[in-house]
Image (tube, rainbow, N blue to C red):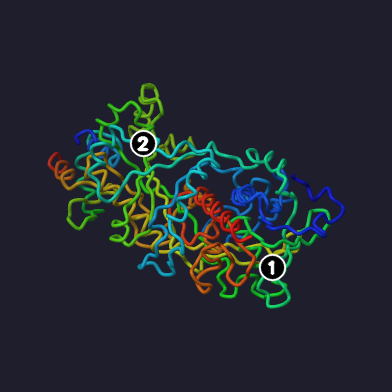
Amino acid sequence: MIVDLNELKADPFKSQDFDVCICGAGVAGITLARKLPRHLKVLLLEGGGGDYSLESQDMYQGRNVGHEYFDLEITRLRFFGGTSNHWTGMCRYMDSYDFDPMTYVPHSIGWPISKSDLDPYLEETVEILDLPELTPRFSGGKLWDESFLKLNDFERIDFWWSPPTRFSEKYKSELEDSDNVFCYLNSNVVDIILDEGNGSSVSTISVKNYVGLECAVKARTYVLAAGGIENARMLLNSNSQLHNGVGNGFDNVGRYFSEHLHFKVGEFFLEDSYVGSIKDLPTELSRTFLSPKLDFINRNKCLNFSTRVVPSFPDDMDDTFKQKMRQVLCFSESIERAVSDVKGSPLLCSDGFLKVTTDQAPNPLSRITLNDQLDSFGLNRVDLNWKISDVDVHTLRVAALETAKMFAEHDIGRVRINEWLLSKGGEELLPGFDDLEEVGGHHHMCTTRMASSAKDGVVDKNQKVFGVDNLYIAGCSVFSSGGHANPTFTITQMTLRLSDYLGEIL
Amino acid sequence: MKITRRKFIAAVAGGVAMFAGRICLALPVNYNDVSNSGEYILVDGWVLKKSDVSDVEGKG
């Protein structure tokens, strides 16, 4: 059933004991609630309502005090279904070497699990996210056949596109009809209370609606599934018993915030035989993602990344009018500049551009902290101090240069690398939103990272918070590193694994 | 690669036909070897094969 806590006058949780209390009804929270064994009594708490509301979304306000980033109240959504409500749907699993430590990157600890621990959940994840079968959508083509088969350093990889699945729409009726999952909307977690003995387990959590009702929830096990920023914020704000918050004995909560850098690194011209002879060239190009092999990554001491080849010509290559217009407008620099001024954005006269998405090096200074501003529940809002390390910028540079060399080597075309990337320097070189860059992927990762020991992270290999027996965390805040792939697929795999684990121990 | 070469030269020089001299002039200003083997060079941001440029110089 789904109930709106705003409509209740009395505490509905009084004298109720749940087996599992899940805080957050996004991809991770809904998946966990659905997949836990049916004999378990599950409480699913959502801070927002059934739809977007300013009242709920306001809780996400915070300050960016580091590298330029999206406003924190728009980069995520706070209502039933969570950020799946504006998800674009790109999916890919992580590479096996994303789980390994990188010896040349400080603070890189690797994951205490491996890809093989998540592989058993691949098919179920495909079903949950409504993905087409996991066969490549594009298996070759005239453009890449000859040249790419010779490649040693890169491989062409595939992503899959979800419709995208809106969890609020797809799974609402199932949760309404469920006899073991009790979902409460407008139920905000305001405190995590530890037992008064040695503080090694959660005794209750405090929940408030928006009209003054405060409740205490008791469960055998608690799971935070509120997103990469809010999971850390909840732990840090639960500081009534421990000054540093819950699970923060080693001051790791909120640290290592990682994103996927998204930057256009250059433009390219194709060799004319490609442009003229491949009818579905735009499709072939737009489905092309290149990713480095492990040997290349180690040799270049860079991070994992993918390069996307984005065509700039029209989808319909037979549209000669558009083609001719483009040729005319791009004929001279002065015309190009004049058109760009009128258009308000650069006119791309090349055949396309290269867009690189990279992993980020773990950086303890890249972090979420509480600031002195309070939300309407009196909880401290967050500061995001996003840091970009030199190795992150180095990775963008390596990706651009090596892809460009590959284009030249195989006479695919020629690449012009963006000027900022050819200058010496680090984070300060990166263009921002004003330069029409995406900068990041709205992926908030690693703030409660998984580690082998409490000194290196916040949760163990089973996503249990170190030092707290019955508190778990789901979502990409537990990633030890981000890889280059969009995180939703991995979040879902890991949540299914967590569901199996909790099902075994409860 | 003749046609592609025309394209990138056009981009560097602004889309006009008299481009060869300009790209030669550009070389000393912004010329970097971008590979250990010396196979590739950087001209105004373009990653080119050395053979691309020698052809252009000849025409210029």
Please state which of residues A25 and B48 is positioned toward the viewer in this rendering.
Answer: A25
Give the answer, above or below, for where A11 lies relative to A204: above
**Residue A109 location, x and y as percent?**
43, 67
Is any atom of residue A106 visible in this view?
yes
Q: Which quadrant does the N terminus of chain B fall into? A: top left
Numbered label attached to residue A202: 1
Q: Which quadrant does the C terminus of chain B fall into? A: top left
Chain under callout 1? A
Give the answer, above or below, for where A364 lies relative to A79: below
**Residue A296 location, x and y as percent?**
29, 56
Residue type, label 2:
Leu
Please state which of residues A182 and A329 is positioned toward the viewer in this rendering.
Answer: A182
Residue appearing at x 34%, y 55% in the figure: A397
Residue appearing at x 50%, y 42% in the figure: A126
Element type where label 2 sits in the image:
helix
Numbered label attached to residue A380: none
> CA separation, marks 1 and 2?
52 Å
**Residue A13 location, x and y as percent?**
80, 57
Please state which of residues A485 and A257 is positioned toward the viewer in this rendering.
Answer: A485
Determine the image quadrant of residue A143: top left
Chain under callout 2? A
Extreme residue in the right direction: A9
Q: Is residue A49 left or right of residue A493?
A: right
Residue type, label 1:
Val
